[in-house]
Image (cartoon, helix red, strand yellow):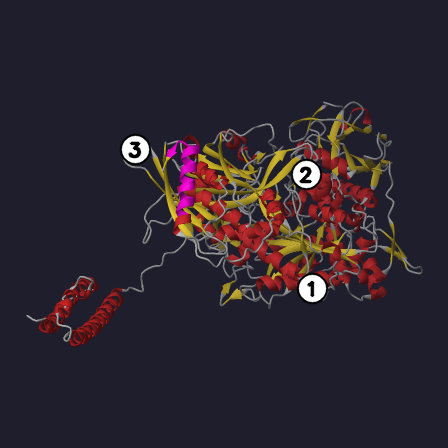
Amino acid sequence: MDLISALESLEPELEKGLDQASSLDELEQLRIEFLGRKGRLAQIMSQLPELPQAERPAFGQKANVVKERANGRFEKRRDELLAAREAAALARFDASMPGRKPNMGSLHPDTLIMEEICGIFRQLGFDIAQGPEVEIDHYNFEALNMPPEHPARDMQDTLYITDTILMRTHTSPVQVRTMLARRPPLAVVVPGKVYRRDSDLTHTPMFHQVEGLMVGHSITMAHLRGILTAFVRGVFGPATEVRFRQSFFPFTEPSAEVDISCFLCGGSGHLGHETCRVCKGTGWVEILGCGMVDPAVFEAVNYPREVSGFAFGLGVERIAMLKYGIGDLRLFFENDLRFLTQFGA
Amino acid sequence: MLLSLSWLREFTPYEGTAQALGDRLTMLGLELEELRHPFAALEAITTGHVVNCSRHPDSDHLHCCQVDVGGEALLDIVCGAPNVAAGQKVAVATVGSRLPDGTVIKKSKLRGQPSHGMICSERELGLSDDHSGIMVLPENTPVGRRLVDELELDTEVLDLSITPNRADCLSVLGLARETAMAFHLPLTIPERSLDCVEDSAALPIAIQDPELCWLYAGRVISGVTVAPSPAKIRYRLMAVGVRAISNLVDVTNYILMECGQPLHAFDLEKLAGRRIVVRPAAEGENFVTLDGQNRLLNSRDLCICDGEKAVALAGVMGGLESEITETTTSVFLESAVFQPASIRKTSRRLGLSSEASFRFERGIDQERSVWALDRACAMMAQLAQGKVHKTLSVNQAKAFVPATIAFSPKQADALLGLSLGSDFALEVLQGVGCQVQTGIEPWQVTQPSWRPDLTRAADLVEEVGRVYGLDNIPPALPAMEFSLERAGEAPSDFVFWQKIRHWAAGLGLNEAINYSFVGHKDLDLLQLPQEDRISIMNPLTAEQNVLRTVLAPGLLQALRNNLAQGAQSVRLFELAHVFHASQQSETGARETGILGFVLHGLRNEDVWPYTPETMDYSDLRGFLEHLLATLHLPPARFVACAKHPYLLPAIDIFLGDEPLGCLGRLVPAIANEYLAHEGVWLAEVNLDLLKKASEKAAVHFVGLASFPPVRRDITVIGGRELSVGSIVEHIRSMKLPYLEDLAFVCEYEPEGSEERHLSFRLTFRHPSRTLKDGEVDKERNKVAQSLINALPVRI
């Protein structure tokens, strides 16, 4: 067989091979067989020197045409196979398969609430202040207008380390420490752990408070109400109303308990025909205690008589229970992952 | 404080409902906790008239009665009481009504005779323990009326929470004052006239320390007959939670509830020497209180003594020996005022709180002490047929001096943020009982004797706000004043901790919060030192008797809780303080912020696409390395150590030369205690150091190299003791100029071999040209040769 016919016979064979090739691997094998460095085309081409000089250009041209056409056919076939493989893959693709989900982290609900509260007060211009959890009696009680044997000490059952050192019963000693360290004007919020000698269904011996203190010139109770209104609207929504009820704390005067309009029933006391479970039908939910700083406290920190200020304190777990609808306080410190993972990060 | 609405109405003509009163008092600072109906169970009981009463034909103790309860027909009722008789007015439970013990009255037959109701005894009505016979009502009682109305029972009782400052509101009188003021009503104290019929010399009263006993007064009442009090007194006391005992004791309780003055009745015959001495107890003195308990006293307890011995623990409880008994015929009735702090000290030390001590601790209206005494005497004369002696025994060691307060109405407006004006302030102050001298500026305001809480201008501001209603203050936002002094200060711990918390939650860890206290035995289990622990003096339980010195016990407790619930994977973290005893601290405690981790169980949930793999050292160390990189801190050094007896292996972490914390695997024996058998990985890192270091860490931009990196792998073979760290350290120490990165790639240990094959990847890059293969190979070979020379390895 002369070289030309050998060349020409390649094409139908290639055609047949391409039709039979059903995968990209087979196609590659076929390409190597025909067009590889030692493939059949190359073998035919290697006989070129045996041709007479005059026939070589025509043969060369012919060979190039065959090669180009073959390349074109291979490409076409490869595109077909690629498309088929893509189509097969798509047919197998199951969009309903679950994702490769990283482990879900979570923050404790107390953390989330403290962060939210502190965030709102920072926006209102308050700094964050902190202080020790083991505290001396003077800062926890005496400087807050609770001398020894003051009956108000009964309001806070105390865990003692010694006769004069105790686990702080509230975050209020940080008020005293802050005022001793800084001159007015000042506005701080104090998040932290506090301790009481109390443990039952509605009390844990450790819980969290956020305390607020603002001292300046001509600070009034109307300002206290304004700041707290802004705060509760931040946490419970813009329609939330605030109610002040006269109360007593040794370190503020006047003192008030603050109720908010119930965020579940909107203050109506009922949902449909049911009594609202959050406010028990009263339309109000007790949320925190507050008041104007008692002059005895200013005196204890040597502040000038002209200043005035307000303070407030709230229980973080209480807010978390209200906001998330948690019914059992004890869950907060059992650290059951089924509890911890419900509130997000 | 339990306040009966009908009792209150004897003192002020309040016509509204109990709820409306409670709501108003709540806004005045006297919070209504609960509205009680102590006799709710008697609402269905009616009064009846026993028209006929005959012996039951088939019983020797039953009676067949016909009772008129105001209906059309007489009711047939079989009654077993021995005292039932025709003509009596009685309490009848008709068919369908329910008795306090839950019994529902049904139509029945008793030995053949029909019975359509029940004639009740006091015990059946829950009014007393008396079951000797049926309750017989006064002859003039109308029939067919509600028993609760006919007995004038106190059916509505307000449970008010009285704050410690409002001593005056621990009585009907005090709450009547508030009610009268709030509703603009008069105060109408019912008169009790005292007729003194006999006389004797006053008992001499000696008060050793006038600071401890300000007033001691008493009267003698002779010829008393001890008996139960009349029904009205007994039921009223019952309604406000006081147990009726006998006429004399009931009077003291009645006056205490009504006027707020605690009283004590002594059996005069048992007072040796007919004299009273008020003195501190001797150290170690024994005294039996009337509850029968022997009390060991000390010199800070105040005693009431007769000529020989202590007869009462002042203000707290009387003595057993001198108490009123059934045979008492003469009484010495005490009314006194003691220093509040002294009473509180004794009451707290002995764990003995009484209605009396509760009021003494908060303050007594000294100006009304003798008045209350006389009121009680009048009642005793009436109820126990006693003869009150004319001469009052009294020693006022320290008179009440009311505070005179300089006050300007402007102060109230300025603090409350209102413009109420002086007329309103004057009305309020006079309304709460102050005397006000207004002609001068500032006003001179005199404290009422019953308001120990009103001594300063701030207290008067509160009264003005309280009566106006704090809830009527409109909200306003203050202008915030800021100081430049604080600009540029480092953020607070809270903010730094917040960053760490979010970092950890972002990596799939779950935040735990544990109590700051644990049990000594928890720390002992971890073999932690004992000398720097801080113990709680009065712990609630032995599980909470010491402050934690490490976070591990709490985290392990949380691990146990979760394993008990079937968790397969626990990845907890906690940020909290640990506490160590320290002489340097004013609180005796050094508080250190710690970030703690516990990892146990599966790395990922055992579901697609994960395969079940257990978390190990690499997970925990990976978190720590990631944390340091997040905070722009250099890599830490992890050094095996033997300092933490509960960890094996135990690894100390150093940041530069500073010890940052530790990590390790809980020793299996301890892990067992927490339900985890192996593979509990713990770490604790000092947050204070971390914060300080991260504040100093500066971020410097490094220009981007534009020439390609060239990588070479190298596998080092050595004995089992060969460590990855030693190779990394050695290669780093060579300080090759173009070595950009060095990473441990994998470990391979051929089967049966005692050797480790450790592969590393070296990445080279030149800042200003492309490195040639040849020179990179030369560098790699240099590394290989150097390792062979320095370490017992081959390449």
- Work out how far the residue at label 1 is from the one at label 3, CA to CA, in angstroms: 76 Å
Q: Which residue is mark 2?
A: B354
Q: Is residue A275 above or below residue B626?
A: below
Q: Is residue B279 above or below residue B150?
A: above
**Frontmost residue, B674 versus B28:** B674
The magenta segment is B776-793
**Mark sitting earlier along the chain (3/2):** 2
Residue count near mark 2 (Cα–Cα under 10 Å), binned few <14, some 14–19, many ≥20? some
Q: Which residue is mark 1?
A: A226
Q: Main secondary structure of the magenta part?
A: helix
**Frontmost residue, B427 versus B499:** B499
Q: Of the residues shown, which amino acid type is indicated by label 2?
A: Ser
Q: From the viewer's perspective, is B338 left or right of B660?
A: right
**Frontmost residue, B480 versus A228:** B480
Of badges 3 and 2, nearer the viewer stands 3
Residue count near mark 3 (Cα–Cα under 10 Å), binned few <14, some 14–19, many ≥20? few
Q: Which residue is mark 3?
A: B753
The residue tagged with tag 3: helix, strand or loop? loop
- Work out how far the residue at label 1 is from the one at label 2, CA to CA, in angstroms: 42 Å
The residue tagged with tag 2: helix, strand or loop? loop
Residue B269 placed where, x, y %?
76, 27
For the residues bearing labels 1 and 3, Cβ distance under 8 angstroms: no
- Work out how far the residue at label 3 is from the one at label 2, CA to CA, in angstroms: 82 Å
Of badges 1 and 2, nearer the viewer stands 1
- Per the image, is B778 magenta? yes
Residue count near mark 1 (Cα–Cα under 10 Å), binned few <14, some 14–19, many ≥20? some
Q: Chain of mark 3?
A: B
Image quadrant holding the C terminus of chain B, namely top left
Of badges 1 and 3, nearer the viewer stands 3
Residue A20 placed where, x, y %?
13, 67
